[in-house]
Image: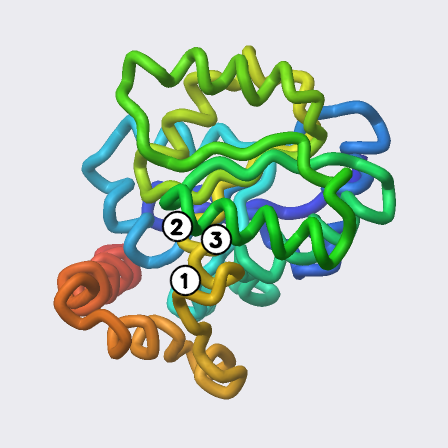
């Protein structure tokens, strides 16, 4: 097993891995027949984890935790625990789906609206092959349906599960049903990635991503829905980082 360093900032454990190192580690564990429970954290999730102890536990128990948010990378450097780079969840998912295709593995897509997840299924079926799809389900359900959904995924024969549901629902679902899903090699939360893949939401240009302004591009597309998440959430994150730095 590869050895890598983990850091801890603001009650959040993060793996100090590059994108390529993350992909190599996932492939290594899959080849060894082990399960990888993957999660990404951004400023908003780190803020939520300060008070939401269930979310904190669900995230910190994951096998691989990447920083999907340039602000988290900057904070790690400011706090003297520098991370190598941002590992964007959607970019990682794209590479993992390609890996699944090359290895003749199957994927299960769980989350988003019915028309969105169907569009993602159609796109991947066209790009690769319909054989890559083990199954799919939209992200609307009641708590009483959760266990049956986990069993449906487990029974599909999939090697990779991508869950596009908002936090903290997806993190807690994956942790709660990890035993039912134990034979799925990769379980990963991917947030709003299905919306991007389906073409509903646009990603920021590369220069904005590199400058750490992807959040602003997202905010500009849906200001009414996103203002609290980004403007209030980012302000809280900055406050928490400054507090941790100067309280020592």
Which scheme is used to colour this image of the protein? rainbow
Q: Residue 194 shows which numbered tag?
A: 3
Q: Position of residue 174 (x, y in %)?
A: 46, 26
Q: Position of residue 178 (x, y in %)?
A: 52, 18
Name the image quarter holding residue 133: top right
Front disc: 2 or 1: 1
Which residue is disc 1 drawn over?
72
Above or below residue 113? Residue 56 is above
The secondary structure type at the circle numbered 2 is strand
Name the image quarter holding residue 223: bottom left
Instruction: Measure the alpha-carbon separation of dots 3 and 2.
Output: 29 Å
Q: Earlier along the polypeptide chain: callout 2 or callout 1?
A: 2
> Left or right of 167: which side holds 108?
right
Kindly tell me whether residue 246 is visible in this rendering: no
Above or below residue 57? Residue 44 is below
Front disc: 3 or 1: 3
Tags 2 and 1 touching, CB below 8 Å: yes
Q: Earlier along the polypeptide chain: callout 3 or callout 1?
A: 1
Instruction: Measure the alpha-carbon separation of dots 3 and 1.
Output: 23 Å
Q: Mark 1 Cα within 10 Å, few/some/many (few <14, many 20+)?
A: many
Q: Nearer the viewer, residue 121 or 144?
A: 121
Q: Mark 2 Cα within 10 Å, few/some/many (few <14, many 20+)?
A: some
Image quadrant occupied by the N terminus: top right
At x 22% / y 57%, what residue is drawn? 240
Q: Residue 9 shows which numbered tag?
A: 2
> Left or right of 153: which side holds 145?
left
């Amino acid at each position: 097993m590869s050895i890598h360093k983990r850091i801890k900032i603001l009650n959040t454990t993060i793996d100090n891995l590059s994108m390529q190192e993350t992909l190599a580690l996932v492939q290594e564990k899959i080849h060894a027949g082990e399960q990888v429970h993957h999660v990404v954290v951004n400023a908003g999730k780190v803020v939520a984890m300060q008070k939401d102890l269930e979310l904190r536990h669900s995230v910190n128990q994951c096998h691989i935790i990447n920083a999907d948010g340039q602000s988290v990378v900057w904070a790690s450097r400011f706090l003297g625990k520098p991370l190598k780079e941002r590992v964007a969840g959607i970019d990682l998912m794209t590479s993992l789906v390609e890996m699944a295709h090359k290895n003749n593995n199957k994927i299960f897509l769980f989350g988003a609206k019915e028309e969105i997840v169907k569009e993602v299924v159609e796109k991947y079926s066209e790009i690769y092959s319909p054989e890559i799809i083990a199954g799919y389900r939209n992200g609307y359900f009641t708590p009483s349906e959760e266990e049956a959904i986990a069993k449906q995924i487990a029974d599909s024969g999939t090697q990779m599960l991508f869950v596009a549901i908002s936090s903290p629902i997806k993190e807690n679902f994956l942790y709660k049903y990890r035993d039912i899903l134990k034979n799925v090699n990769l379980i990963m939360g991917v947030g709003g990635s299905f919306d991007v893949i389906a073409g509903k939401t646009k990603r920021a240009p590369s220069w904005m991503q590199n400058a750490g302004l992807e959040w602003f591009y997202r905010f500009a597309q849906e200001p009414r829905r996103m203002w609290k998440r980004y403007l209030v959430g980012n302000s809280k994150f900055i406050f928490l980082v400054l507090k941790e730095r100067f309280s020592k």
